[in-house]
Image: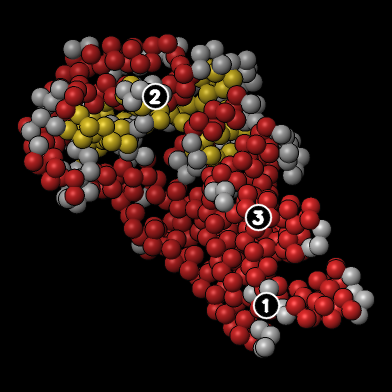
Amino acid sequence: MNSLFDTYGDAMLDAFWVTIRLTFWSAIGATVWGTILAGMRVSPVPVLRFAGTWYVNLFRNTPLTLIIVFCSVGLYQNLGIHFTSESSPTFIRDNGFWLAVLGFVLYTSAFVCESLRSGINTVPLGQAEAARSLGLGFRQTLTLVVLPQAFRSVIAPLGSVLIALVKNTTIASAIGVAEAALLMKEMIENESDQLFSVFGIFAVGFMILTLPIGFVFGYASKKLAVKR
Amino acid sequence: MLSAVAGCGSTEPRDPLADARDGHLTIGVKFDQPGLGLREPDKEMTGFDIEVAEYIAQYLGVPPDGITWKEAPSPQRETLIKNGEVDFIVATYSISESRLRAVDFAGPYYIAGQSLLVRKDETDITGPESLENGKKLCSVAGSTSAQNVKEMYPGVQLQQFDSYSSCVEALSRGKVDALTTDDIILAGYAAQYPGEFKLAGEAFTTEKYGVGLAKGEDAARDAINDAIEDMIDTGAWRAALEKTMGKSGFPLPDPPQVNRY
């Protein structure tokens, strides 16, 4: 066990750092896109509602591995979509990273949207009606009155979505992003006699990342929830 | 039969010789490696590993219809042996130090070396050194081949996928310049897609493929070593290689010396 840390200590820090960066950018992207989707799903425009519903059902029900592999095989290899110059010396590493982030944003935003929509349902209808009677439009009603309250009521579920995202980043190893799961594969390949120690190390590593998220979001949800 | 049934739920390693006396063996192989261990659409098994496994089984007195093939993906091989889910494994299984701490090996029955597969019209790539100026290379995530390249040729851009077939796809689309793993595996892909790919340069590592079995089954290991030596001596080894790798255009090597440690 100690020899594992001696040999792989630095590599583990590097790999978990990639996991954290994947999570960070994906969480930001998913929050933004998920909020827009939630707005679409409660909007008065039927086409937007339809598009939002369609999107959520499509991405929520597609296996994440499929989405991530599609980002690489479909978007990059077939359609030629890439995020850095193809002649860059670190092209494969950077492009793979952002393709994975794109995949996580596409997938996780569906869950953010649904959490947020349930939060919107906790805001009494009268508030939206009052906002309308004051002359606010739909966008103002949503951004000034409804969403701030909705977010505060769904902090705990958003924490669960974030925890799921941290663990889901392991799928990025399928397209070669050098995060924790890929290092785990290397260690299993090299240290086949210490399988359970290797699994144990990574299980603990992920708990170190996810347990604090649970505590922080749990605490924040108690503090910030709108008391009704 | 009874022991075979009893073996299913056990977590004890199996004794291949006892199973062979009962007329039945469970052998771990790859299902997705053309030319080595491949399950055809009609569920028939083909490849050099399969030929070796069948020869060993026959030598131990088990006919081909007494063999149950079990898929042995690389990360699970030691566990399958330790838990007694297979009698032994013939699945491009390189003998390495850390694996020798977990399981025993008979053989080697083949000596492979890491090499490169490129598109047929490729002329710039002549070996791993020629990849260093930012060429793109593909391998399987976490595999020894991928790690070798990262260590020995840091200037190479390495794309890692979950499977070699994704790499073959990327290679044929021109998104990577080469695919690396053991030469015999590459030769299998070259044979599967005739006229599309070729091997480039010399092998730059040595991988000894052995038959993996549970630690301490010394009698079984001796018997399997005998079987491999017999296969080499009778010419069946070369014939099997010819049959499975012949059309890849890959120069067939000489048989290895079995190592009775």
Query: Nearer the N terminus, badge 1 or badge 3?
Result: 3
Residue B128 seen? no
Measured Cα–Cα span from mark 2 to mark 3: 36 Å
Q: Nearer the viewer, residue B162 or A102?
A: A102
Which residue is depicted at the point 84% across and 73% down?
Answer: A141
> x, y (%) of residue A33?
73, 59
User: Label 2 is placed on what type of residue?
Assistant: Pro
Q: Amino acid at mark 1?
A: Thr
Of the pair A146 and B122, the residue shown nearer to us = A146
Q: Which residue is mark 2?
A: B41
Dot 2, crowdedness within 10 Å: few (<14), some or many (≥20)?
A: few
Chain on which label 2 sits: B
Left or right: residue B202 versus residue B54 is right
Measuring from the top left, give residue B14's x and y in whole percent: 15, 43
Q: Residue at x 50, y 50 (%)?
A: A182
CA–CA distance between discs 1 and 3?
20 Å
| Cβ atoms at labels 2 and 1 below 8 Å apart | no
User: In the image, is B52 to the left or to the right of A99?
Assistant: left
> Element at badge 3?
helix
Residue under pointer 3: A56
Instruction: Identify the element where label 2 is drawn.
Output: loop
Identify the image's colour scheme: rainbow, by chain, secondary structure or one colour.
secondary structure
Instruction: Using the rendered view, name the quadrant where residue B211 is placed.
Output: top left
Q: Nearer the viewer, mark 1 or mark 3?
A: 1
Q: Is residue B168 above or below residue A147?
A: above
Quarter of the image with the C terminus of chain B is top left
Q: Which mark is residue A122?
A: 1
Q: Residue at x 53, y 68 (%)?
A: A209
